[in-house]
Structure formats: structure tokens, C-alpha cells
Image (spheres, grey):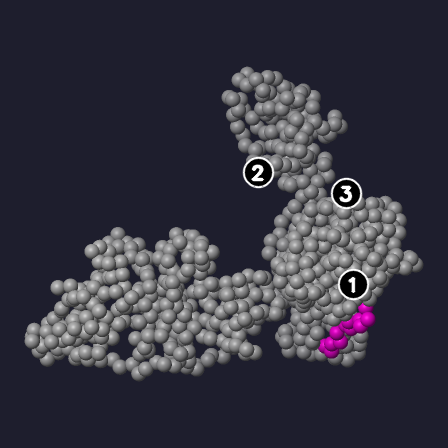
Amino acid sequence: MKASLNWIKNFIEIEKPLSEVANVLTSTGLEVEHFEESFSVKGGLQGIVIGEVLACEKHPNADKLSLTKVDVGRGNLLPIVCGAPNVAVGQKVLVATVGTKIYPANSEPFSIQKAKIRGENSEGMICAEDEIGLGQSHDGILILPNDALVGSLASNYFKIEKDGLFEIGLTANRGDAASQYGIARELSTVFDKPLLFPETIAIQSKIPLKTKIEVKNAKACARFSALEIYNIKVSESPDWLKKALNSIGLKSINSIVDITNFVLHELGQPLHAYDLDKLKNDHLVVDTAKENDVFIALDERKITLKGNELMIFDDEKHCCIAGVYGGAESGVTVETQNILLESAYFSPDNVRKAAKQHGLNTDSSFRFERGTNPEMTIKALERAVFLLEKVSEKSVETSAIFDFYPKPIPPFQVKLKLSNILKVAGIEIPNEKIAQILTGLEIKILDKKTDVWQLEVPVFKSDVTREIDVIEELLRIYGLNQIPLKKELNASLNYGVSSNDGQAQKTVSLLLKGKGFNEIMTNSLSSDKFYENKDELVYLSNPLSNEMNVMRGSMVYSCLESVAHNKNRKQTKTHFFEFGKTYLKKGDKTIEIEVLFLLVSGNQYNESWDQKSTKADYFYLKSVVQNLFAQYKVNPKKQELFQLSNALKQQFGIKDDVYYTTIDWKNLINSKGEKVFVLKDIPAFPAIRRDLSLVLDKSVTFKQIEEIVKAKNSKILSRTNVFDVYEGKPLENTQKSLSISFEFYDETKTLSDAEIDPIMNGLMSDFETKVQATIRR
């Protein structure tokens, strides 16, 4: 949120340096992420002075350039080469001296340097208005009246206004500070300065409201205030209003819209203006939307409603998503003559849901989500009418105020025991200071006769409902830096043994890191757009955005973002693992599953001059999983490995193949068998290898070959391996050739052909009969 120091000074007298104000705000919990000086003209015309041209002659080496001598009040004349056709002796001009940074209206800023232009020295620049951001004209240099004082600053001559801007990282619990007035309240309390409320006008009209307003959902709309304003003229806003909005980064639109924006940022109370003549049958209803209704927003976007949004509509159309976005069919235009001005208190939960569901983050929703002040609705209307009279320079005709507030929200009643401040903070705060802070924060002291004070906390401080909350308010204003640190610090050490689960994770992590994997930690929130079966997803009640509206049902999508991030930074090897949870909905139950996720993509190893870059593939990942399962004596037969589809690769901008698997972590460690460490002698006898080439139908898998080999149950057949696969001529299109090696070994002796041949003959016979193999001899 942006704040303007000049705007804040309308409510409090403060002459502190910008950096000090920023530090004070941060210390009170309003973290200033960035602050800077700003000017009504970019750059503030700093370094630009008024000069007088005392000499002007044609440049000897350029037809369109002039050599000038300019007096800028420094005792010496500056030689300046000027390209403007209208430069002449006796003119009062603006001069950017050497070292000045200027900000052209239509290009990037640059600094003035000493230079030689076509062989002649130039020590400055005589400026046109567009070259220093004063306007758009570039017909020639800007010529000032003769009474302009030579040597005076251009910033003083043009009355450039200086301001201080803050970018505040407003947390979700600080709706009370979501305005210029709210920030001024904080500063007035810290500096113990009077706080002025902006000027308003009391609405005394007896004209009844022509519009019939019905609030049918009082739970989502606790208060709805409105008035009608007649015979207005929508016009361009005056400079003071434009400057105020521009100071916090808002563009001027027209006088009505600008006033509603001004009040929103000044008081933190959103307003919405409807064109009164566009409301069908002079009827306005506040109620929940119907599913699949279509709302046409101010930007002409068509939004299909979910059926849980709070809407404001007439007898024909939806006029507004309450607290979020206005509608095109009832919005104010330059032709508008009569308006209905709304000032309401909407439920933060309801506004947040609607805003996040449709990706509409507006200044209004920002404030309603954090909780506005229900006691501010009528004051905001009165402030708007005052501003409208100021803009139009005449009295404004209004109706009486309509105010729907059937159940006023009561302030919070809190008891503060003064001795508890010492217990919490370790310091004593004088009673007078406590009273000053509470009063400054608009917390009423109802009774302070004893050690226990009875307080009444205003409803706009929605997070201050308990004694500890009040103490926190006191300490953040009094200053956490004033709480001294003790010379001795005590800490309790935990000597507990880490859990088996933690030790297992550590063991697996070391194993995977040894194979070149990197551990990652990704967000457990995901988007439902990745999932086909949305019935099993666990949706969030109040998602931060549509990109994070469900608990992840799989870890692959968040991991793919990390893969894409690394690929875009030229990382050729992206092997990741992550311990985490996935979430599924089974009926009425939500299930958390602890998993270990593995993913490989790119090269198996980092690039090296002496090692060929081999791509990681399905079999590489399979070997990693087999080694992992071997660590836990688990049979990996049922573990599924996946290759990422081309569609998902394209969606994430990944070109390399991606292979991944999700391992049920609890099942893995619970199935862990007893580890047996056995030492064996180095083989004393040689192993014997036999090779076979089989021509098979393509449908035959190696698993079928393995099962035939295992069925032999031979104690001396120690290993079977495929070392070549061939498809193509002279084989048929439906055939393939497998070259398989068989390794025989006996720990007690050297094997003979007589022992091996019967096994090989039996295998060949089984291959021919069971899988219709042809033995290539």
C-alpha cells in the first residue's frame, strides 16, 4: 500500500525526516518496504537554474547549431552549444548545468556532461519543456518572462512540490491502517500530536431516497448506507485532486470516480457510484448471486458467477460484485447527471472469496478483506459530498441518507490489568503514557480507578479483542526497542532422541544426494486446473488466488515449476527429490499421504571433458528406485514410474524428457526388513557366460523371459541380462531380436560344459514353446 507524507500532513503536524518517519512506521508494525522523495515534476528540476543568454552566434561547423554564452549567476559565463531555432540574445532560459540528471517526458533520463560538439565546448544544456518533463512541446527552448531572476532555482520558480512516498507491506490484520488517515493515527500516537479528521458536510436534506433499497443478506452486508446526488456535472478533476491521486500512483478518470477513489484512500472506506438513471425501476437489491448468472464488469469482461458472491442488482441486471468490482451497465460516464452513492460494510470473508474466485484484486477488496470500519460509512458519504461541492464550486443537491444497520456491531470490551504489562514486557510503562497511547489509538478508557482498567476497543481494530492484544498495541507504540535485554539468557535444551522417521529421511537423503539428486521444498498449494478428477481434490475455503486454490493431490506440478526454473537457467541436470504430503478427498474425509517424490530430467551426470553426457531415462530412475528399495529390503514390483506427457512439457516450457515416481513413504519405512550385512570372499573360481539371440514377437516382454529363467530354479545361474535389442530388416515388422547373456557361477568349483549345456538346452526349448521364440544360431 502506498502512502503520501504530504497527504498525511493534512491530519497531523509533522516535520520529521523521511527516513525517521519510515523507521517509526516500521517499528509500529507497518513495515515500510521502500520510501523515496518524489516531486510534482519528475526529478524536481534539481540542478536546473534560470539563466540569461548574453551571446549567440552561428556554430562554425554546423548549420543548425548555435554557440551561446549564458549567465547562470555564478560569476562566469557558460559556453553552451544549442540546437534550438528560437535561441537569441537577451532571453531568460532554463539551464541544466553539468552533472544534472534530467527526465524527458517521452524518453529515458540522462545526465548532462561536459562535451565537445563539432569541435566546440559545451558546459550545459538550454532546455525545452519536454526535455525536463514540464510539458510535451519541442518547438524550441522554453523562454521565460523578463522578470525571471538569473541564478534562481527552477524548482522554486515553478513551485515544484516535494513529497515523501512510502510503500507499506500491510499485513492482513491491519485494516485500521489501510488509509492515509489510519497511518496518520499511528504517527500522531507515537509523536503525541493532535489528529485532525478531514472536513465533511452534514447532510440535512429531507428529500426522501427515490431508490428502493433492499438488503436481503444482512449477514454478508451488515451495514448499507447510501444517498442520491442530483444534477451533477461529470468533469475533469482539479489539479489538487489529480496530484493527490498521482502521488500514490492513481490516474485521474473524472471528478466523480476520482472523489470515490480519494475517499477510499483517505479514510479507508470504499465508495461506489451508480448512474441513478440506469437503475431499472429505481430498485436496488443486495443479495447472494445465482449460479451461472453473467455479470458484465466495468472493463466489459463477462464473469460467470459461482452462486456464492454477494451482488448488488436492480430489476434487470447485476450492477456490482459487492465490495469488489463495479458493473459496466450502471457505471458513471461523462453523460451521468444523477448518481446513487453507496458506502457499506461487507463481510471480509465474503469479499475475499468473491475476489479470489474471479481473480479480481481491487483497492476496495483489499480493504474490505482486512475489515473496514462500519462506523465510517456515513462520514465517508459526508466527506464525498464536501469534496463534490469543492470540485463543482457550488452547493450539491442530495437526498436524505439511507442507512441499513439493523444490528450495530458493538465495540470490544476488554479488561487491562496494569501489572500484566510488567509480566509480559518486563518493563513498567507510566500510567500517563498508557492512557496517551490508548487514547491516540481511539481505545476508550471507561474506568481506571483500580489496577484493572475497563476499555472499549473500536470495531475497526478487529484483531484487538483480548488483554494480550491491548498489551501488544501498547508495546508496539511505546517501542519494542525500549525493552532492555537481560545480561543472562536462559534456554532449555532438548536431549530427546530423534524419531526413526527422521533418521530414515536422513538416510535416504544421503543416498539420493550421493546419486546427484538435490532436495527441494515446494508449495503444498496448487491449482485445480492441473487435475482431471476434481472430485478428489481438497479445495481451500479462502484461496489466495486461482493458482493456489487446492491442496496438492500430486507433487509433480509444483516440482515441474522448479524444473522449468532450472532449465531456463541452463541447468542440464535436474534430478530432484522431496519429502512431503499430498491430499485427497475420499467421501467426507480428507486423507494426508506422506510421500517421497523423485524426478529426473536432463543428463545423468554433470558435463565433463572425460565423460559422455548420457540422458537420464526410465531405466536410470528405475535403478535409483531399486537401490532405494534394496536399502529397505522392499520388493519394488508395484512401484509405478511415469514419463511426463508432451502436453505438460509444453505447458511448463520444458523440452527434455521428464521421468518421475511417487513413493508412499510410510509404507516404505514400515515395510523395512531387517538389514543383514554379510561379508563374502572374492570369487575364487571364474564365472562362465553364454549368449543367446532370440527372435520374438514385439508383444513379448523381458519379464516373460525372466519368469521362464526363474522357473528353472538353477542354483548356478546367477545373472540374466539383455545387452542388445534390434528391430528392422530382415526381421518382420512385428518382430524384434533380443540378445541375452546368462552368467553361471559356483562358489566351490569351476563349472564344466556338461553342467551348463543341459540348462541352456532347456531354456532354449522353453523359449521356443512358451513365447514362440526363434533361436538365432
- Residue 608 x/y as whole percent: 28, 54
Circle number at residue 108: 2
Task: Tell me the kind of residue under disc 3.
Answer: Glu
Q: Which residue is mark 3?
A: 236
Q: Which residue is mark 1?
A: 285
Q: Residue at x 68, y 61 (%)?
A: 293
Residue 291 shown in magenta: no
Regarding mark 3 in the picture, which secondary structure is present there? Answer: loop
Q: Is residue 335 above or below residue 514?
A: above
**CB atoms of marks 2 and 3 within 8 Å:** no
> Which callout, 2 or 1, points to the residue nearer the camera?
1
Regarding mark 2 in the picture, which secondary structure is present there? Answer: loop
Task: Tell me the kind of residue under disc 1.
Answer: Val
Regarding mark 1 in the picture, which secondary structure is present there? Answer: strand
- Screen quadrant of the N terminus: bottom right
Q: Which of the two labelled residues, at mark 1 and mark 3, occupies the earlier sequence position?
A: 3
Q: Is residue 380 above or below residue 428?
A: above
Pick whichever, 153 or 733, lies toward us: 733
Task: Tell me the kind of residue under disc 2.
Answer: Glu
What is the C-alpha distance between the residues marked 2 and 3?
29 Å
Q: In this picture, which residue range is highlighted in magenta?
A: 405-416
